[in-house]
Image (cartoon, rainbow, N blue to C red):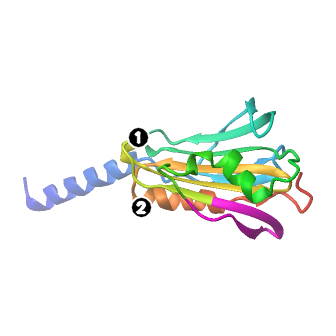
Amino acid sequence: MPARSLASLALVSLLASLACEDPAPAWQPFESRTAGIAVEFPGTPTVTVEQQITLPTVTEVERVVFDRKSRGMLQVSSYVLLPTGGIPVESLLRIDCLVAFDAGSKFVAETPRKLAIAGQEAIAVTGIAPPSPSLPNGGWEEDRCVILGGRMIHLMAIGPNDAETRRDGTRFLDSLRPLSSTAP
């Protein structure tokens, strides 16, 4: 077969294989009216509402999960923050949301910090789990807990320890926005 025909055949094969690859995910906003927030996912997440023990009682928790299979998952959980006399809200972040970040934990937690999210005051703490065999594919995890509009919002990004996971995790974690200035 002539060299030119072989080159054409190779090009057609390459183009055909590229056409069969999965397209890059289309990121889309997800709005939770319950939580009064919006976040971005690279697809449609699954939403569940369940009863869960939180500090200091049983509370209804909304959990929104986008399972990326071998690429890990992105998740946001939220619930009403009950009044707790005498306990600073910064402490609630560690006690209720990031208890796994205590001494001896695989997580490295930041000091709670105040920030503005779309004009609303919030308090947040972020924890990063270094690469670990207990995570998918020896993976990486970053959690961010935010007290916003009277709710505890816990965002989690888990996946393989690679640039794509960290890039997608950052995009997801940074996408948190209140739906309005009167979020619950």
Q: Which residue is mark 2?
A: 163
Q: Residue furthest top?
A: 51
Q: Which residue occupies the extreme front position in the image?
A: 86
Is 3 within the magenta? no
The reply to whether the C-beta atoms of the residues labelled 1 and 2 are less than 8 Å apart is: no
Could you tell me which secondary element the residue under label 1 belongs to? loop
Residue 1 vs residue 123: left or right? left
Three-letter code for the amino acid on which mark 2 is drawn: Ala
Total count of labels: 2
Residue range of the region highlighted in magenta in the rendering: 109-125
Say which residue appears at 77% left-offset and 40% top-offset.
55
User: Is 14 left or right of 149, judged from the image as shown?
Assistant: left
> Which label is found at residue 134?
1
Question: Which is nearer the eye, 87 or 131?
Answer: 87
Q: Which of label 1 and label 2 is nearer to you?
A: 1
Q: Label 1 sits on what residue type?
A: Ser
Q: Position of residue 23 (x, y in %)?
A: 47, 51
- Residue at point 48% right, 59% down? 166
> Most extreme residue toward the right, as rendered?
182
Name which of mark 1 and mark 2 comes first in the sequence.
1
The answer to whether residue 118 is magenta is: yes
